[in-house]
Image: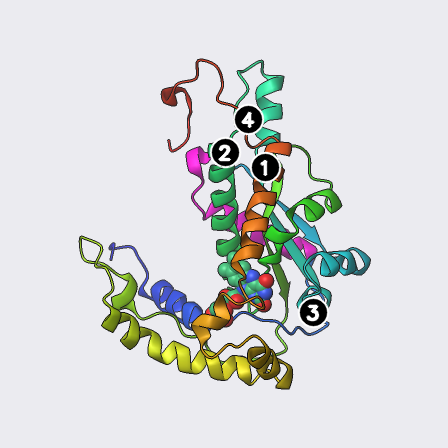
Amino acid sequence: MSPDHEPSAAQAFSRLMQAHRSIRRFRSTPVDSAFINRLLAEAWAGTSSSGNLNMVSVVKTFDPERKARLYELHLQQPMVLQAPLVLTFCADSHRTRQWLAQRNARLGFADFYSWHVAAFDAMLLSQTVALALESHGLGICYMGTTVQAMREIADFLELPENCLPVTSLVVGWPDEAPAQRDRLPPPLWIHEERYQRPTPEHIDTHFAERETRGRERYLAMGPEMAQAWQQHGITSLAQYYTSKIKYDPDRAADTSAALQTLLRERGFMAAALPGATPDEVPHGR
Ligand SMILES: Cc1cc2nc3c(=O)[nH]c(=O)nc-3n(C[C@H](O)[C@H](O)[C@H](O)COP(=O)(O)O)c2cc1C
């Protein structure tokens, strides 16, 4: 610990981590827009940014009518309607390219690498914002459906070229206190010096608790879920995960193809710039 580091900051951080739960039920109490702006600015200042390019935009949606449209686009996940605020985090090289153009600089950042840089910056910021919100007692839930509805959300939010949504957070005051969700145990994912491939015994041992708890949790969701498991011949959590009713690999393949098409259309897959060398690309500085 550095000499001027306050132990209380570490304790507060530790408490914050332990208190994390995704929140899917919210009170109707409003969330203040100016407060959110302050928090967003603070979170961005506290988040690293590749090359300090800051190729990220965040769109706030408070308007209930507009949120109702987002609810449709997010596959009708009810928390989009209930939460007073939806934050959409966008990978955005549009602004950077406009700046370059206005300064007669060579244009760039319209390629897959720049998408990667901007998308990861957006994800990094979203997590800092999530922690910042949680530190004030607000609840959040990520919306993975942002990826499935990327085109429609981009159009709805009027995003320009070279700007696409990568994730969203629903935000509000929690109206539930769910139990803490498990994570895979450290021996499975923390490696000493070299990657240690899991043996079949490792998988059996370390997935056992997750399999029991996960299965119980899903089947406790109601008779429809138990019926669906039966209909699809699902007998384990692993089978459920890649079944038609969860993360269907066929659907994932379609989403992947659509994503590539969209990136091409929206200017994130341009061919390499003629004569460009890696040295000229300022990422990572
Ligand atoms: C990128 C991302 C996308 C997610 N998308 C959804 C979603 O669409 N709907 C949902 O209910 N939860 C979503 N979640 C929340 C996860 O289900 C949740 O984080 C996980 O089950 C662990 O629970 P916890 O956050 O309460 O610890 C998402 C989480 C992440 C990181």
In contact (CB < 8 Å): disc 4 and disc 3: no
Residue 78: mark in rendering: 3
In contact (CB < 8 Å): disc 4 and disc 2: no
In contact (CB < 8 Å): disc 2 and disc 1: yes
Measured in 3D between alpha carbons, the distance from the residue under mark 2 to the one under mark 1, in whole angstroms, is 8 Å
The residue shown at (61%, 74%) is 174
Lower sequence index among marks 2 and 3: 3
Measured in 3D between alpha carbons, the distance from the residue under mark 2 to the one under mark 3, in whole angstroms, is 33 Å
Colour scheme of the picture: rainbow
Lower sequence index among marks 3 and 1: 3
The residue shown at (43%, 17%) is 276
In the rendered image, which residue does mark 4 sit on?
A: 270
Task: Give above or below for 101 relative to 210.
Answer: above
Res 273 visible: yes
Lower sequence index among marks 4 and 1: 1
Q: Residues within 10 Å of mark 3 (few under 14, many from 20)?
A: some
Circle 3: residue type: Pro
Residue 49 belongs to magenta span = yes
